[in-house]
Structure formats: structure tokens, C-alpha cells
Amino acid sequence: MRIAFIVFALTCLSACSAVGFPGVYRIDVEQGNIVTPDMVEQLEPGMSKRQVRFILGTPLVEDPFNKDRWDYAYRKSNGLDILSENRLTVIFENDVLVEVSGDAAEDRAGA
């Protein structure tokens, strides 16, 4: 009888976590670097790392194995739902900007 009660209690608890409590407010969580199209438009080939850092801010990811690649990622989520997600990659050669790719760069190229 005791084992049946424990199994029943665990089943009820696991069901609550899967469905969630109705009426519970979940806040929007923003993580990463916000990179606007205006910021990307200011980037030009030949800029130094310092100039790029001034415009975009400190990159979220600096690859320790590739010092010439910076990744800017941004995600806005509400609970488990991802509302928006953007990525931008900046490539340097000899500390000079040579390539910008990602979601914001594609918006710039398409305009």
C-alpha cells in the first residue's frame, strides 16, 4: 500500500511539471548581445578589432582556438519558448575586419 501511494504521488508530481501550473506568469529572458541593423551597417572591411568592439560591444563568444573569429549571439525566450534568436559572426585577418556573416548581415545584404 505504501509503495502504491509513493508511485501515485510521484506520478502526480511529474504530471504537474510537464504541464505547468496554469496562470503562472513567465518573464521574457534576454541573453547575449543585442546587435541592431544600424550597428551592422557601420561595419566596414578594414576596421580594427578595437573599432568593431566599440560598435558592437564585447563579443559573447571569443573562440580560444581562433582569435580572429568573434560570435555575437542573442536569444529572447519565454519559459521554454524561443521568441527570437539572432547570430552574427565577425572574421578578422591580421586584426583587420574582412567578413561579417549571420542574421543581421543577411538583412543588410538583402536591403
Image (cartoon, rainbow, N blue to C red):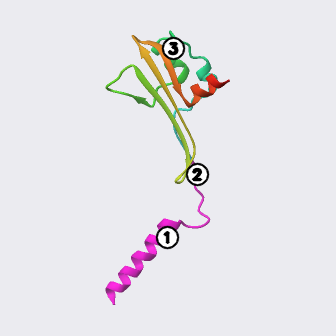
- Image coords of residue 28 (percent x, y): 58, 48
Residue 53, compared with residue 4, is above or below; it is above
Residue 55, compared with residue 32, is above or below; it is above
Judged left or right of residue 67, residue 18 is right
What predominant SS class does the magenta segment belong to?
helix
Three-letter amino acid code at the position of disc 2: Ile
Which callout, 1 or 2, points to the residue nearer the camera? 1
- Tell me, for residue 16, which label it has, or none: 1
Asked if the residue at tag 2 contacts the one at tag 3, i.e. Cβ–Cβ closer than 8 Å, the answer is no
Q: Give the range drawn in magenta.
A: 1-28
- Image coords of residue 105 (percent x, y): 57, 25
- Tell me, for residue 51, which label it has, or none: 3
> Which residue of the protein is positioned furthest toward the front in this rendering?
110
Q: Which quarter of the figure is the C terminus placed in?
A: top right
Residue 44, compared with residue 38, is above or below; it is above
97 is within the stretch colored magenta: no
Q: Which quarter of the figure is the N terminus placed in?
A: bottom left
Identity of the residue drawn at 41% across and 13% down: 93
Asked if the residue at tag 2 contacts the one at tag 1, i.e. Cβ–Cβ closer than 8 Å, the answer is no
Q: Is mark 3 on a helix, strand or loop?
A: helix
Label 1 and label 2: CA atoms lie apart by: 20 Å
- Disc on the earlier residue, 1 or 2: 1
